[in-house]
Image (tube, helix red, strand yellow):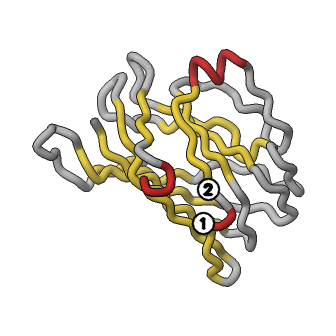
Amino acid sequence: MAVAFGIPNQGGNVQGVEWLWTPSLYTAAATEVLDVFATTEELAGFMVQTGGAAIITSLFIANSADNEPELDIYFLNANSSLGTEGSAVALTDGTIIDDMIGKINVPTTAWEDLGTDHIAQLTTKDFGALQLQAASGQTSIWAGIIIQTAVTAVASALTIRINYTLL
């Protein structure tokens, strides 16, 4: 769900939009490098205007597992599959070329241990100015997660807070 808590600036951009995403995750067993951790999910209404654009300003991730996995969060402008959760990535050239609009890497060094939970926060200084563009006629974007480290204790829940500015 997106919540606009900002106001339009002089350029007409809406700053301070927040999206809370709790992806469905593969939790049945250990994961391998390049497994699909969260299959592609629609973030319906992420953009206010059809074909809209946004710049991601920060990510805050809460991980209920006691681990620090390296994750790649992929953003797409169509409902294209990354593959099956818990299995190796299965991408087509068409998906990579036509549908992927951005990626943010969450390195293992980004995680902070809070006992049985871990948190990570990344900002534009970590991933640059990532601009996402919805497809023509769409207000949705899609997102999925590929794991880059093998882990034996997988998260029962990740909560990802995406902060962004609508352009």
**Which sits in the foreground, 44 or 56?**
56
Q: Residue at x 60, y 25 (%)?
A: 79
Quadrant of the image containing the C terminus: top left
Badge 2 element = strand
Which of the 4 quarters of the picture holds residue 132? top left
Q: Which mark is residue 132?
A: none
The amino acid type, in three-letter code, at marker 2 is Val
Where is residue 112? Give x, y as percent: 61, 75
Residue beneath the point at 79% across and 35% down: 89
Instruction: Please state which amino acid type lies under the numbered disc 1.
Output: Ala
Is residue 63 positioned above or below 101 on the image?
below
Are the two marked residues, 1 and 2, in contact with CB atoms closer than 8 angstroms?
A: yes
Q: Which residue is mark 1?
A: 110
Which residue does the image show at 81% across and 44% down from the upper left? Answer: 35
Question: Which disc, if any, is residue 106?
Answer: 2
Q: Secondary structure at mark 1?
A: helix
Name the residue at 65% across, 67% down: 109
